[in-house]
Every structure is written in C-alpha cells, then in structure tokens.
Amino acid sequence: MKNIIIRPYKKEDRQSLRDLCCDVANRGQPIEDLLPDREVAADLLSKYYTDYEPESSFIALSDGKLVGYINGGLDNRRYGLVMFWLLMPPLLIKAFKRGFFFKPQIRQLFKGMIKNWRRIFVWRKKSFHSHQGHLHIGVADDCRGQKVGQRLVETLIDYARTTGIGELAASVHDQNKNACHFFESQGFKVRENHPMVTINHGKEENYHSLLYVKTITAH
C-alpha cells in the first residue's frame, strides 16, 4: 500500500494533471486511439478545470508524484458557457494549425459524432442548462485498488457541500465495468442511459453512455 496524500490542486500541478488525464481518458487507457494530439486532447479534457475552476480540483500524490486527480465543475451552466465561448474557439484554431483535423482518427470521430447527434445536441444540452455539478476522475494504473479514487470522491463531495449544490454527476462508458462498479460503490446511481456509437480503427462499436448521479446532502 502506497502512502497517498490528497490535497487541493495547485498551478504547479497543471502539466502533471494534463499528462495523467490523457494517460487514462480512454476507459482507463491512453487517449491516442480517440484523439491523436495530446496537447489538443489535454486542453479539451482539462483546461476548463485547471484554468477556470481550479478550486474544485483535488489531486493524489505518492512520493511527490501526481497519481490521481478529480476535476469538479460545480455549475454545469457556467461550464457549458465557458467551454463554448471561451475555450472552443481558440482550441479549434490551435487544432487546425497542428493539423489535427487531417488525421484519420478525427474522421472516425466526426462519423461517430454524427451518429451521436442526439446525445450531443439534445441530452447534453439539457445537462448544460442545469446548475448542478459534475466530475471527472483519473487514477494511475499502478495506484488503482488502493482507495485513491474513493478518497478523491469523498474530498470533492465534502467541498461540494460547502457550495450548496445538490448533485454531482459522472458520465461513464458502459463497457468500462471497473468505473461502473466504482461509482456504484460510492453511492452514485444511473439516472440516464443513452445509446451511443464509437468508431475504432474503422469498426463501429455500439455502447451506452451512463449518467451516474449522487445526491449531495448537508451534514
């Protein structure tokens, strides 16, 4: 059992958090099969939390190394507005300059987005218009099974209670059985279940996107 320290995120943790985020973003595996440019992927997955709401993020350290993180967005409406108006325009320009849109994985991604239009533009729109919260969590492979994720979730929930929000949600791929079991063990319950399509190496895969929700109650 490693000695794990949980503490609030600091600016100097930014690059380590971005690295780990990309290392585990694809169902616990590296992001490259889905998004081939790590710099663009890290911006998309973590920049809101590190640059616009850093007070809602917490990290796990082992011997001074970042081995886990939890990013909280405690107002979904604010998150959606910042992503759409402040983060996406410069990110699209950056991605274009880096040749991101000319890579074969991106054509597959766009094909999947077209098939998933209802999830992206209807169901997700509903969640972006709420003032509840959500989270993203990641733990390094060699630190899983040591209650790092549990401690990170408990830390964020304790903090979330002080803000007065009523719920925290997490979106999970239904084939990620470990993640499903983890959230259920932490008291999250499936509220929404949406059919989705992903395209990997030219092959279409059908799955469901599960929205796990936990009600936050005051002490």
Image: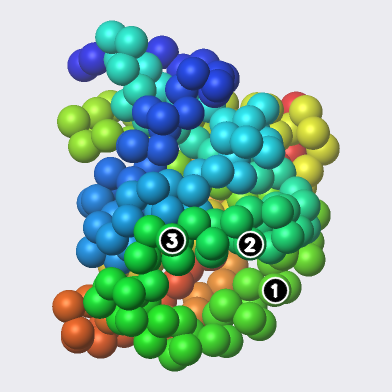
Task: Find out whether the residues at labels 2 and 3 contact each other: C-beta distance under 8 Å.
Answer: no
Visible residue check, residue 26: no
Q: Quadrant of the N terminus?
A: top left
Q: Quadrant of the C terminus?
A: top right
Q: CA distance from mark 2 to mark 1?
A: 19 Å
- Residue that carries the numbered disc 3 in the rendered image: 97
- Residue that carries the numbered disc 2 in the rendered image: 89
Identified by mark 2, the residue type is Pro
Q: Nearer the viewer, residue 32 or 161?
A: 32
- Residue that carries the numbered disc 1 in the rendered image: 125
Residue 27: % across, % down:
30, 57
In the rendered image, the vertical position of residue 28 relative to residue 107, given as above or below: above
Tell me if 84 is positioned left or right of 43 in this view: right
Which disc is residue 176 wearing?
A: none
Task: Find out whether the residues at labels 3 and 1 contact each other: C-beta distance under 8 Å.
Answer: no
Q: Residue at x 24, y 28 (%)?
A: 143
Query: What is the residue that sits farthest to the front in this orientation?
Result: 97
Identified by mark 1, the residue type is Lys
Q: CA distance from mark 3 to mark 1?
A: 29 Å
